[in-house]
Image (cartoon, grey):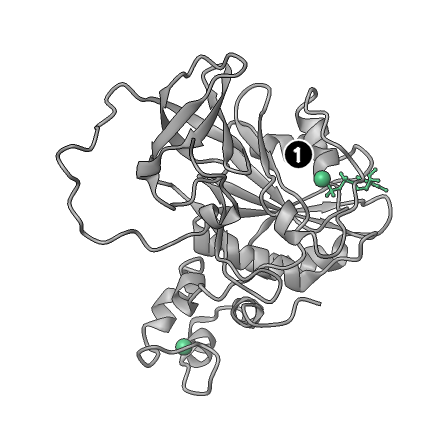
Amino acid sequence: MPRELDEDDVRVRPPRSTRPRTKSRPTHDDAVLGDVVTVDRGRYRVRVGDELVTAVRARELGRRAVVVGDRVALVGDVSGRADTLARVVRYEPRTSLLRRSPDDNDPLERAVVANAEVLVVVTALADPVPRPRLVDRCLVAAYDGGLTPLLCLTKSDLAPASELLALYEPLGVEAVVTGRGSGVEELRERVQGRKSVLFGQSGVGKSTLVNQLVPDARRAVGEVTGVGKGRHTSSSAIALALPGGGTVIDTPGVRSFGLGHVTAAGVLAAFPDLAPGAEECPVGCDHLGSSCRLDAWAAEEGTSPERLASFRRLLLSRDAPED
Ligand SMILES: Nc1nc2c(ncn2[C@@H]2O[C@H](COP(=O)(O)OP(=O)(O)O)[C@@H](O)[C@H]2O)c(=O)[nH]1
Ligand SMILES: [Mg+2]
Ligand SMILES: [Zn+2]
């Protein structure tokens, strides 16, 4: 029996160096491909065609993280029948990776979701009060991980959206506003046929939205995430197929999001309009100090000061406290 796995097994580690594959290592030409739907204490649920297959990791995978959204190769019993187990022998190259670095709340670096195209940053306009700094950090994580952010402002029946919309307008982030059933069609249009992950504080309405997008999802709504449960909840994302194509991933509430791994260059990559200006900066410029050339460049080029200020706000959000 494989050893009981814990969350250490979903830690992101640098790829093991150049040790060549031994001749005796199986190539698994007969492996079938599937998508990881949930991860639960070392057990994976993997969608293979229309079947859901339960799998464990093969020893040859080492300690590499496998997360929701990963496309994996399976061997063994892939019938999906009760009491059968397949083995995950490898995962396919990722097209994106949402990840968090260690912080005060969570000492491990974690991959959160792989291969999503869209990060839907869900924020309630009231109840719970919006936390723009957490939104900023989610945007940074999206840019760094290769996902396109989409802002979803919920509970518009409780408070107006104008202030938050104005805050994100200079960043060019697309936004949808939902409330008590309205706006869901706009959200559906944007996630249809794509792989999206819903992310945000507990209680903002993520599961409510998923239930509207996926009629048979039956996600529990209104559950409260207790203090100190971060470790437990951080691993229970679930991927659901959208009617008509695409996948939406519901995640538990995030309280914080470590971004120690994100460089200024990683954020700048999402601002191609500022990149020519940054070329005039000193090597290794953090784009925050007085030697940064971006201000002078922006003034000459007519780039809006709001855009530059918003870029800097995101840079600063990497180390700012979130509340
Ligand atoms: N007023 C209002 N309440 C909502 C709306 N959407 C969800 N809720 C409520 O907010 C609470 C948390 O919703 P839930 O979907 O569980 O949030 P999650 O923790 O982000 O998944 C529940 O009591 C929902 O009924 C909305 O548009 N307006
Ligand atoms: Mg929920
Ligand atoms: Zn600079």
Quarter the N terminus occupies: top left
Q: Nearer the viewer, residue 86 or 130?
A: 86
Which residue lies at the image location 33% right of the left edge and 81% below the top edge?
282
Residue 286 percent across, percent down from the top left: 42, 77
269 lies left or right of 217: left
* Quadrant assignment, res 261: bottom left
Identify whether 254 is placed above or below 80: below
Image height check: is 318 above or below 89?
Answer: below
The residue positioned 81% from the left and 45% from the top of the image is 156
Quarter of the image containing the C terminus? Answer: bottom right
Instruction: Give me the residue at 71% from left, 36% from top.
Output: 207
- Looking at the image, which residue sits at the far front? 1
Disc 1 marks a residue whose amino acid type is Glu
Q: Is residue 243 left or right of residue 79?
A: right
Quadrant observed for ligand 3 in the rendered image: bottom left
Q: Is residue 288 visible?
A: yes
Q: Secondary structure at mark 1?
A: helix
**Residue projecting furthest to the bottom:** 290
Q: Position of residue 162 (x, y in %)?
A: 75, 55
Instruction: Give neighbour class at mark 1: few <14, some 14-19, many 20+ (Cα, 10 Å).
Output: few
The percent coordinates of residue 6 (x first, y second) are 52, 45
When asked about the image quadrant of residue 238, the answer is top right
Q: In the image, 175: left or right of 276?
A: right
Q: Residue at x 68, y 32 (%)?
A: 210
Read off the residue under disc 1: 186
- Residue 228 location in percent, x, y? 71, 56
Relative to 275, 107 lies left or right: right
**Is residue 235 positioned above or below 12 on the image?**
above
Of residues 142 and 229, the one drawn nearer to the viewer in this rendering: 229
